[in-house]
Image (tube, rainbow, N blue to C red):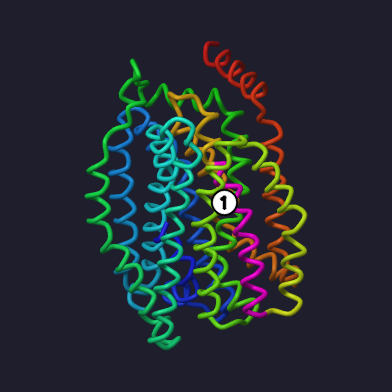
Amino acid sequence: MYDFQIFGYYAASIGATFFPSTSEFASLMAAFATFGAGFLMRPLGAVVLGAFIDHRGRRAGLLLTLSLMAAGTLSIALLPGYRTLGLLAPLLVLLGRLIQGFSAGVELGGVSVYLSEIATPGRKGFYVSWQSGSQQVAVMFAAVLGIALTSVLSPAQMTQWGWRLPLLIGSLLVPFLFLLRRSLEESRDFLDRPRKPRMAEIVRMLASNWRLVALGMMMATMTTVCFYLVTTYTPTFGSSVLHLAPRDTLIVTLCVGACNLIVLPLSGALSDRIGRRPILIGCTLTALATAYPALLWLVSAPSFARLLGVELWLAFFYASYNGAMAVFLTEIMPAEMRISGFSLAYSTATALFGGFTPAICTYLIRITGNRAVPGLWLSFAAICGLAAALILSEPARAKILRHSEAAAVS
């Protein structure tokens, strides 16, 4: 997640390096489109790598995804700009993002399912919440690093070469992460299964369970849109739209990460006690009622204090929702396709909606002139999440699974 945050934070600088244009808007949109293009590879990664992990095991898959992500990050960090390579530069940046997206398509699902399978009884929500909780450490570290760099480097230096430093630092973490993942034990739940379906069988199961995957995608839309709105898009929104100091927007992002880190495990633990659906329904209703009014209040008189208050409020119901959503998604998928089903639902939501949130918000503000329009985009995501949570009662899920099994037999 650190790699994705860095690309979003420095989208303007990356755009100037690889997509130079006389229009700042065009350059920024090109960078955000490239950022979003990586998400288009996520569904493919979810199917291919997800089927591989469901067949071969969790540990092997987590090592593979880390290797692919590292290759994509390092390639972007070291790549010369447009002035040196011409049209080849943006094409290679796009290739690096596609490799990252292919890897990330199964990363969240793989880790979430692994945590759910090693969780102690009655604590699945708490365990799984640490997948997204650990992402907030990446958000916070990236923000702290950004604050430090903007303090010692001029804007011109950041645009020319300073944005590369965070990517290189991220690459230095890879050997440590590789050693950590090599030390993981395979989950007992996976080892105890009498039969491991082949990859082709898992793909057929995904097709027959398309209704369940589609509903999971609707739930994940709320999470992905809200997450990328309050983290990746915040620095650009604060500086380019609200015209606040870049340092202030990074401080807000740091606070958002800290809020998420605290609330996510609390929400996961609460869902273990009261159930997942009450939290999912309550959070989406809250988002529908408050997201757009909060953004209207912010843009009416932009300030650091207002940006901080609004972003923390959005972060609170993102973290509350996701703490219950991730574990719920692991529970509604059949065991044989648990990682691939989770990953396909989540990555499709990211590819269609969440990953393009910075680009969509930038475009909507441009054509409407309404700086609060990101609140309406978040409201749309909340409607998707609310509808899925209302539909996915236990009897409805059982009915969907019966239809899927009948379709698979026929």
Identify the magenta region: 303-325
Residue bearing mark 1 = 224
Report the residue that reaches farthest toward the top. Answer: 410
Question: Dot 1, crowdedness within 10 Å: few (<14), some or many (≥20)?
Answer: many
Q: Residue at 28% across / 37% down in the picture?
A: 60
Task: Pick the residue in front: 79 or 335.
Answer: 335
Q: Residue at 34% across / 27% down in the picture?
A: 55
- Residue 199 lies, in percent from the top left, at 37, 26
Left or right of 109? Residue 191 is: left
Most frequent secondary structure within the magenta stretch:
helix
- Residue 371 lies, in percent from the top left, at 71, 71
Q: Residue at 77% across / 64% down in the picture?
A: 293
Left or right of 322? Residue 293 is: right
**SS label for mark 1:** helix
Considering the image in quadrants, where does the C terminus appear? top right
Q: Is residue 402 above or below residue 211?
A: above
Query: Residue 305 sits in which quadrant?
Result: bottom right
Does the segment drawn in magenta span residue 135? no
Three-letter amino acid code of the residue under disc 1: Thr
